[in-house]
Image (cartoon, rainbow, N blue to C red):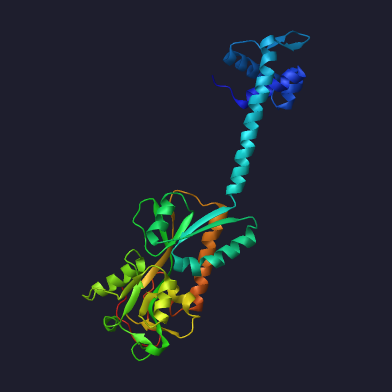
Amino acid sequence: MNIAPRQLRIFLALAESLNFSRTAQQFFITQPSLSKAVKDLESELGVALFERSTRSVRLTPAGDQLVPMARRVIGEYDTGLRQMQGRAEHEAHRIAMAALPSLANVILPGVCGALEQRFPHAQMSIVDCADGAAVQRVIGYQVDFALASASPSHAELQFEEILRDRFVLLAPAAWHRRVRKQMRMEELTDLPLISMTDASTAKKYMSAAFLQRGVMFQPKLQLDQIGTIAGFVKQGLGIAVLPYLGILPLLSLRGMRVAEIVDGPVRSVGIVRRKASPLSAIAAEAVEQVRVVSDALKRQMPEWILPPGTAPTAVRGVRPDRAT
């Protein structure tokens, strides 16, 4: 049985008016079209719904029985549509983003602040997690997009590079003799380096940079949280080697200094999203604000934060080797 909601609406209107001309005008159709709609409904149901004469129209007993059922069906149908519309309006103000903690810390606060101004009722969900986990959340439709530090090799995803940041050393100020303002990769092998864990892209970048020079990267310590790394560095237990955006929140700590790795690697940072899924209005605005915040970082710190595709140059005139 194939009965459309419009057919039931026409039936209910005619059952109330018992006037073909008035009902046809109500639905902006001709009387022959109305008659056909009623006959089609009767044919689907296998019963006559109206008795017609040249002077009057009245419901048959089957028509009388159909009226309350049709009202209930149309009522439930309209209620369902309103619920779906309300849900759609609710979803239109929801945004979910995933990012590495270093990127979530530096980039996403500005993004969320801008979103709240344009979407006062925005409901934002932020997941700060490892690179691979962030990408998996995009694949699994758990977030609208992710900020990641490597282009994922997945056919359903696209990667838009927004910036690159250089790897630096974070050391106690008292170590100024051992850690100069500018260092080369070959000088790092004898330092008590502290890095992120093997699961992090930061560790992978450094490992690749050392391997290009025929050296295995063997840090003194591997820690999962940047705040923990900062505590060990401040205590004088080692020297952190991290991307610049990773140490940016730690620069306000007293007794710390940043050293440039003139020939060190640069980390690629970009937006990961699904190719086939259009972004909602709020998600599209969030992506645009990510670009705005990234551009501001590049303007404010051009020696550390680089445009996409850019190789680093030395901050203070030292010519670096080719970056990895």
- Is 51 situated above or below 204? above
Q: Quadrant of residue 72?
A: top right
Decide if residue 307 is in sight here: no
**Residue 163 picture location, percent across and down:** 44, 69
**Residue 78 picture location, percent across and down:** 65, 32
- Is 155 situated above or below 314? above
Q: Quadrant of residue 231?
A: bottom left
Report the number of numbered marks.
0
- Is 190 situated above or below 297? below
- Is 136 situated above or below 117? above
Q: Residue at x 74, y 25 (%)?
A: 25
Quadrant of the image for the N terminus? top right
**Residue 298 left/right relative to 68:** left
**Residue 139 picture location, percent across and down:** 41, 51
Q: Residue furthest left?
A: 214
Q: Quadrant of residue 68?
A: top right
**Residue 108 picture location, percent across and down:** 52, 65
Residue placed most toward the observer, 147 or 22: 147
**Residue 5 left/right relative to 13:** left
**Residue 73 left/right relative to 257:** right
Decide if residue 73 is in sight here: yes
Q: Residue at x 62, y 26 (%)?
A: 5
Q: Residue at x 53, y 69 (%)?
A: 293
Residue placed most toward the observer, 132 or 268: 132
Q: Residue furthest top?
A: 53
Q: Residue at x 76, y 8 (%)?
A: 54
Quadrant of the image for the C terminus? bottom left
Q: Residue furthest right?
A: 55
